[in-house]
C-alpha cells in the first residue's frame, strides 16, 4: 500500500519555530490563555522557514470557516454564474459569519493548543538534552 502523505523537506528548524510560537501564544503555563471570540482576526505570520511553520501558517489562513473559496464556474455563461455567486455571498455574508462564528473560535483555539504543545515539546527536549549531558558527564567521571 502506498503512503497517503509524504513530506520531503530539509531538517526542521526547531529553534526558529519555537521562537515564532512563543511570540504568537506567549510563554507556556499550566492554563492556556483564553482567546476573546471578538478578536478572532487572523494574525499575520512571517514567511515560513520550515515545514511545520508552513503547516501552521496554512492552518491559520484556513481557520476562518466563514470565508469561502473564490467562486468559479465551468459553464458557458461562467462570468454570469460567478457574478451571481459573488452577489449571493455578499448578501448572505452576515448570516454566514454568524453561523460559523463558533467554528472560527474553535479553530483559533485549536491552533493555539497545537502551538502550545509544540512549545512544551521543545521545552521537554531541552530538559532531556540537559539530563543526557549530565548522565554522560557522570559516566565519564566514574
Image (tube, grey):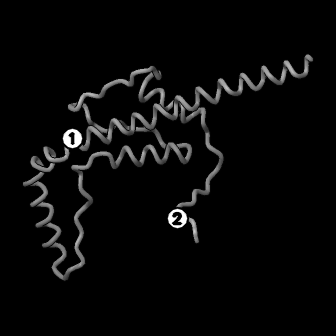
Circle 2 is placed at which residue position?
Answer: 4
Q: Is residue 25 above or below residue 81?
A: above
Q: What residue do we see at 56% from left, 32% from top?
A: 121
In the rendered image, the vertical position of residue 26 relative to residue 80, given as above or below: above
Q: Could you tell me which secondary element the residue under label 2 belongs to?
A: loop
Quarter that holds the C terminus: top right
Where residue 21 appears, as percent x and y from the top left, is: 48, 32
| Separation of marks 1 and 2 at Cα, in angstroms | 31 Å
Kindly check if marks 1 and 2 are in contact, taking CB atoms under 8 A apart as contact: no
Q: Residue at x 43, y 44 (%)?
A: 57
Which quadrant of the rendered structure holds the N terminus?
A: bottom right
Q: In this orientation, which residue lies closer to the viewer: 135 or 101? A: 135
Left or right of 79 on screen, residue 33:
right
Q: Is residue 120 left or right of residue 131?
A: left
Pinpoint residue 22: horizontal percent, then vertical percent.
Answer: 48, 27
- Residue positioned most to the left: 91
Determine which quarter of the picture holds residue 102: top left
Q: Position of residue 63 (x, y in %)?
A: 32, 45
Residue at image x 52%, y 44%? Answer: 52
CA neighbours of label 1 inside 10 A, class few (<14), some (14 to 19), many (20+): few
The numbered disc on residue 121 is none
Q: Relative to 9, is 136 above or below? A: above
- Residue 103 is left or right of residue 111, and the answer is left
Which quadrant of the structure image shows residue 108?
top left
- In this view, the residue in front, 21 or 136, is 136
> Which SS class for mark 1?
helix
Question: Which sits in the foreground, 17 or 82?
Answer: 17
Q: Residue at x 29, y 28 (%)?
A: 35
Total marks shown come to 2
Q: Nearer the viewer, residue 43 or 127?
A: 127
**Residue picked out by circle 1:** 102
Tell me if mark 2 has few (under 14), some (14-19) or many (20+) residues whose alpha carbon lies within 10 angstroms of its own. Answer: few
Amino acid at each position: 500500500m502506498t503512503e497517503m502523505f509524504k513530506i520531503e523537506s530539509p531538517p526542521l528548524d526547531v529553534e526558529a519555530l519555537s521562537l515564532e510560537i512563543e511570540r504568537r501564544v506567549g510563554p507556556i503555563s499550566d492554563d492556556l490563555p483564553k482567546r476573546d471570540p471578538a478578536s478572532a482576526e487572523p494574525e499575520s505570520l512571517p514567511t515560513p522557514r520550515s515545514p511545520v511553520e508552513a503547516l501552521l501558517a496554512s492552518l491559520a489562513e484556513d481557520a476562518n470557516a466563514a470565508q469561502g473559496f473564490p467562486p468559479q464556474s465551468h459553464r458557458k455563461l461562467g462570468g454570469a454564474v460567478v457574478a451571481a455567486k459573488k452577489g449571493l455571498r455578499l448578501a448572505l455574508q452576515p448570516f454566514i459569519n454568524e453561523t460559523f462564528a463558533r467554528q472560527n473560535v474553535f479553530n483559533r483555539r485549536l491552533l493555539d493548543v497545537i502551538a502550545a504543545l509544540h512549545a512544551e515539546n521543545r521545552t521537554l527536549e531541552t530538559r532531556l538534552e540537559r539530563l543526557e549531558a549530565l548522565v554522560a558527564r557522570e559516566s565519564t567521571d566514574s
